Amino acid sequence: MNNLFQIAAHFVDSKTIEDIQPLGNGLINDTYKILVNGIPKYVLQRINNTVFTDVDMLQSNIETVTNHIRQKYELLGFQDLDRRVLHFLPADTGKTFIVEEGKYWRVMDFIADSYTYDVVTPEYAFYAGKSFGDFESLLTDLKTPIGEIIPNFHNIEFRLKQMEDAIAEDRVGQMREVEVQKFVEQIRAAADRMCLGERLYREGKLPKRICHCDTKVNNMLFDVEGNVLCIIDLDTVMPSFVFSDYGDFLRSAANTGAEDDPDLGNIHFNMEIFEAFTEGYLEGTKSFLLPIEKDNLPYAATLFPYMQAVRFLTDYINGNTYYKIRYAHHNLVRTRAQWRLFEETEKSLAGIRL
């Protein structure tokens, strides 16, 4: 804990720091709250540089995006900007992060009287759609380029190549399993239609936008009255298709089962969540969304469970080197669950036009 005080002192006057306590249960970064005069004043966070290998790019992306949104809000006459946009403190190095013993740290203002929600209801699905759509809309006129912090993150052609590479190597002999062979055949059979987005992009018909790329309902802060304050967890903000923000939210939020549900009978596609999120998203993006983007949003909803099934199966074939597992066949169970969700989503959205 003493080391945390020393780290925080690079950003904050050490004499004002009363205590530093754990905050939240994030899966990627370690997060703490810094108390001043008995109340949380700042957030101290260790950046996981195993996941985010270019921290300079990461922080540059976030600063570019938050500064742009802040300027837009100022022009619109918004009040209380420090509660509407994340603000990162400069360290004594002049940057918004420091490196201590090979670990990367940053500090941002703590937004008081704010809350997150983990349960997805139609109401919060609508808020999420509207908020993430607004977020993209605010960044459509961003002139400063930002980097792709995780290259090919949502590129299905890249993910399929990873799978084929894993099959060719078959380093632990998983390709002997009949069920693995069956999934490989099914994935290959659907690959052509699932690569639609990448083909449209190469043809110059589909643009890339600045997207959040981690659209979960708990990546929004609400005030005490239930109004959305701001979008948080900006580490994955990068150029992508709008399909990323739309499809990835529905992959988790509209799934009636768990991501690794062993009972496939639990897994269906929740149309009520789909409709609420879509209504909000179309409202938030109405100023810029192209017809080709809007028309292919149902495709995006099917793409993301398909892509996640590919990723889980690839990791299983590789010997479970990427995702944490609780038992030997965990990634295969995850593959089953995501493939069922893919099938349920395609069935539910067949013929849907937005």
Image: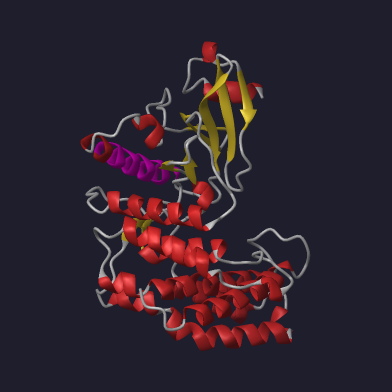
Q: How is the image coloured?
A: secondary structure
Front residue of 265/337: it is 265
Front residue of 127/16: it is 127
**Which residue is at a point 49% across and 49% down the rendered structure image?**
53
Q: Report which quarter residue 136 is drawn in.
A: bottom left
Q: Is residue 272 magenta?
A: no
For residue 37, side relative to residue 180 (left or right) = left
Could you tell me which quadrant the C terminus lies in? bottom left
For residue 65, side relative to residue 31 (left or right) = left
Could you tell me which quadrant the N terminus lies in? top right
129 w.r.t. 308: above or below: above
95 w.r.t. 151: above or below: above
Q: Which residues are magenta?
A: 55-71
Q: Is residue 69 magenta?
A: yes
Q: Is residue 131 visible?
A: yes
221 w.r.t. 296: above or below: above
In the rendered image, residue 161, in percent from the top left (x then y), is placed at 50, 76
**Which residue is at a point 48% across and 41% down the rendered structure image?**
226
**Number of labelled discs?**
0
Q: Report which quarter residue 183 is drawn in.
A: bottom right
For residue 121, side relative to residue 296 (left or right) = right
In the rendered image, residue 56, in percent from the top left (x then y), is placed at 40, 42
Q: Residue furthest top?
A: 15
**Which residue is at a point 48% across and 83% down the rendered structure image?**
191
Q: Residue furthest right?
A: 327
In the rendered image, residue 16, in percent from the top left (x then y), is placed at 52, 13
Q: Main secondary structure of the magenta part?
A: helix
**Which residue is at a point 56% across and 46% down the rendered structure image?**
117
In the rendered image, residue 178, in percent from the top left (x then y), is placed at 72, 87
Q: Is residue 153 visible?
A: no
